[in-house]
Image (cartoon, rainbow, N blue to C red):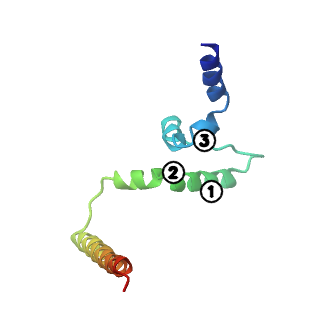
Amino acid sequence: MNSIASQVSSIFRRPNVFFNSLNSELQQWRGIRVKVQYGNLDQALTLLQRKMQSSGIERIIKAHEFRHIKNSEKRVLARKKQEYKFRSQDLAHKLKAILVKKVRGL
């Protein structure tokens, strides 16, 4: 019983070793924190922006913005989405053909 307790306590002493996969979830739960060093607010804001981009919060905020989208903008977005879909399908077909050739030994 004491060995289990010591293992559990060692996990809590070294959380970065065992909970790296949960790091992003914990970061979203507790928010993003940035220290302002030597009164340099510009540096802290750029660091905050980088952290927001890397954690994906910026995309979440942009996705939840409620604003009017013009019809022309909707058409442009739909065309880009369709081009992306066709491009990814084309690449998938090419990859499949390459893999089939490898398997068959041609």
Decide which of tag 2 and tag 3 comes sooner along the chain: 3
Q: Residue furthest bottom?
A: 106
Residue carrying label 2: 55
Q: Where is residue 40 shown, x and y percent of the image?
A: 73, 51
Secondary structure category for the residue under label 3: loop
Residue at x-position 57% and y-position 42%: 20
Of residue 27 and residue 44, the one placed in the foreground of this image is: 27
Q: Quadrant of residue 46?
A: bottom right
Establish if 86 lies above or below 32.
Answer: below
38 displayed left or right of 52? right
Residue at x-position 52% and y-position 37%: 26
Image quadrant holding the C terminus, namely: bottom left
Q: Amino acid at mark 2?
A: Ser
Asked if the residue at tag 3 contacts the one at tag 2, i.e. Cβ–Cβ closer than 8 Å, the answer is no
Q: Quadrant of residue 18?
A: top right
Decide which of tag 1 and tag 2 comes sooner along the chain: 1
Decide which of tag 1 and tag 3 comes sooner along the chain: 3
Establish if 9 lies above or below 59.
Answer: above
Q: Amino acid at mark 1?
A: Thr
Residue at x-position 67% and y-position 28%: 13
- Dot 1 surroundings within 10 Å: few (below 14), some, or many (20 or more)? few
Q: CA distance from mark 1 to mark 3?
A: 13 Å
Q: CA distance from mark 1 to mark 2?
A: 14 Å
Of residue 47 and residue 16, the one placed in the foreground of this image is: 16
- Dot 2 surroundings within 10 Å: few (below 14), some, or many (20 or more)? some
Nearest-to-viewer mark from 2 and 3: 2
Residue carrying label 1: 46
Residue carrying label 3: 33
Of residue 16 and residue 75, the one placed in the foreground of this image is: 16
Q: Amino acid at mark 3?
A: Arg
Image quadrant holding the N terminus, namely: top right
